[in-house]
Amino acid sequence: MGSVPIYEPKLKSLQRIGRGKVREIYAVDDERMLIVTSDRLSAFDVVMSEPIPDKGRVLTEMSNFWFAKLGHIVPNHLTGVDPESVVDGEEEKAQVRGRSMVVKKLNPLPIEAVVRGYIIGSGWKDYQKTGAVCGIRLPKGLQQAQKLPGAIFTPATKAVEGHDENISFEQAAKLIGEDLARAVREVSLRLYKEASEYAATRGIIIADTKFEFGTDAQGNLVLIDEALTADSSRLWPAAEYRVGTSPPSYDKQFVRDYLETLGWNKTPPPPKLPADVIQKTSAKYREALERLTGKAIA
């Protein structure tokens, strides 16, 4: 196991300007921010009370891997600045080590760019009801987890609280403009195609994924947040994939499966997680990183 699990970083040298379910955001200066990825885990949009050891380090390492591998498609928000250089003292350096990135301040788009290569999750539910996902008609008779004839772009709104909502391309275009929406769709599909082709060589299926984008002062599109991690994607071991059932995945599945046995109403406060569920979930995140990148978290 790696470093001590971090539920909430406590940095006094920088001002915290934002907090997500998993990440903490601090101001470095007028043009840069420090993003620290904690070991918090969110299930059913509720943040659990216990951290998952190494999760934040795995997500950061995985994002950095994909940012480097796919940088020829679209610029990303990384500055290349060492996170330890923008905080004070060894205690703060230890809190950001291996789980942080110094990024450019950009204008985030108010949509999530979701790409689906397989029919699963909320897309499967929508398809069962309407035969379509986000307004895109799909062939009749598809089974759960079946590969689609081609990857589809299915945007969603970004919810601060609660669930994101699937929207059509036309709705996304109204939010961000037609030209920008087309650019986001094209780039997202290219990112997914290259990533999924690479992942297949490592025995992993990327069933779907979620990208986030921002724009710089000149209006250029920039990939932000995280990229193709086990939190933002459905990663399946190819050897265990079967059409017609929901395959096992490299993410928080152990937590979700456990919570489903409790009769919990999926609202705060969350139930306490047993030690074995925490350990197995941590192992799955680390396994995904090692399978995809060949690198392990020490």
Image (spheres, rainbow, N blue to C red):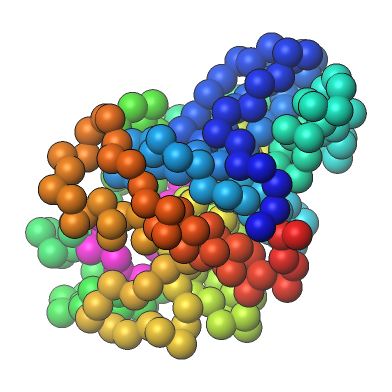
Name the residue nearer the viewer: 184 or 42.
42
Query: As displayed, is residue 230 above or below residue 290?
Result: above
- Residue at position x 49%, y 51% in the image: 231
Residue 172 seen: no
Residue 208 % position (x, y): 43, 62
Vertical position of residue 95 compared to residue 58: above or below: above
Where is residue 188? Give x, y as percent.
54, 55
22 left or right of 90? left
Find residue 273 and report its horizontal and vertical position in percent: 36, 47
- In this view, 6 is above or below 116: above
Name the residue rendered at 23%, 63% in the picture. Answer: 124
Query: Farthest residue toward the front?
Result: 275
- Quadrant where the C terminus sits is bottom right
**Magenta segment range?**
113-124
- Residue at 28 percent of width and 57 percent of height: 258
Going by the image, does 213 lie left or right of 296? left
Instruction: Pick the quarter of the image with the N terminus.
Output: bottom right
Foreground residue among 141 and 103: 103
Q: Quadrant of residue 271?
A: top left
Magenta residue check for 199? no
> For residue 150, what is the image quadrant?
bottom left
